[in-house]
Amino acid sequence: MKFVDEAKIKVNAGNGGNGCLSFRREKYIPFGGPDGGDGGDGGDIYLEADDQVNTLIDFRYTRNFAAERGENGRSRMCSGARGEDFVIKVPVGTEAWDENTDELLGDLTNTGDRMMVAKGGWHGLGNTRYKSSINRAPRKTTDGSPGEARTLRLEMKLLADIGLLGLPNAGKSTFISQVSAAQPKVADYPFTTLYPNLGVVTMKDVRSFVIADVPGLVEGAADGAGLGIQFLRHLTRTRLLLHMVDMAPADVKQDPVESVETINRELENYSDALGSQDQWLVLNKMDLVPEDIREELCQEVLDRLNWQGKVFRVSGQSGEGCDELCAQIMDYLDDLKEQEQLKNEQAE
């Protein structure tokens, strides 16, 4: 299935029903008076997060959604029925933006979250509403108001604990296939990954975390170059970034240090939050580096980067160092959860 993480749709809430103009006419009751009922309210339109929906691809084919109109009022002071609401199912992790104002309407991050995106019209009033001691036969009614209409931009952001980033062909897909059951396409040429892949890493003690592999970034990604800008948004939800570095590039002119600096510049250009996110350096493809120069090469990269964070030496192909990396990721996530729980308890 083609991965689609952005779509534009039009939503129209239902119009309100019109009020009724009617007078009571019954035998032996010559002065029955007004008995026109109100109309019904128009139906609202909601977005609802559903874990059974994985992408926004359905909205490529169906773009217009409308809720039911409220019924008109009737005689004998009968109000019209309210229009039925319309619920649009979207993937968990979907943001809704107003396309015209660029306003963020809401973010659906949990299964079952529901958000109103278009309000139905208000019902019209029947002539019964206007009777008074000086106006016993009113002929005034009001029409229902139109329902709200909007053009929405839906953006899906993957909900993952860990995000993999790096230049094309850095070995991200090989790594995620090594540590999880995910089976992304792996080949020896750049841009093998064309859309994000999710993998669940399960530890021996049954603990687990979700890791996201996004297409490789290139210089200028934050400005729209390559596939980067389309998928950088998925990294904003992650708790930790793993920066994969190819230590044995096929192109000998490719410098690992420049690769790291290029990617980090793109993250900072995209957003300050993404640029300051926790990041671990993962020196990949160590099985292809001769043992006699392995330590010297790694230390040279770290010294030139002046890297102060955590560093891991792994091989996505052979699995070397992957278990240790996953164990430390799990401990890191557990510590974060404990800190968040403590903050919530203190806030209460």
Image: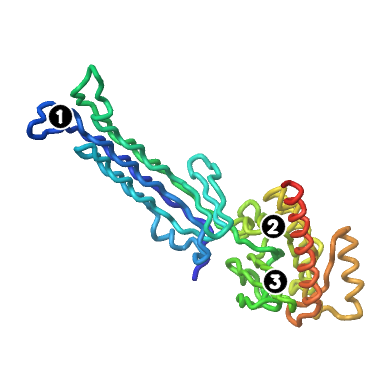
Amino acid bearing label 1: Gly
Q: Nearer the viewer, mark 2 or mark 3?
A: 3
Q: Which picture quadrant has residue 339?
A: bottom right
CA separation in Å, label 2 and label 1: 80 Å
Q: Of label 1 and label 3, which has the lower sequence position?
A: 1
Q: Nearer the viewer, mark 2 or mark 1?
A: 1
The disc at residue 275 is: none
Callout 2: few (<14), some (14-19), or many (20+) C-alpha neighbours within 10 Å? Answer: some
In the figure, 339 relative to 79: above or below?
below
Q: Of label 2 and label 3, which has the lower sequence position?
A: 3
- Numbered disc 1: secondary structure: loop
141 with respect to 120 (left or right): left
Asked if the residue under mark 3 is in contact with the one under mark 1, i.e. CB atoms within 8 Å, the reply is no
Q: Where is residue 120 shown, x and y percent of the image?
A: 38, 42
* Residue linked to disc 3: 208
Callout 1: few (<14), some (14-19), or many (20+) C-alpha neighbours within 10 Å? Answer: some
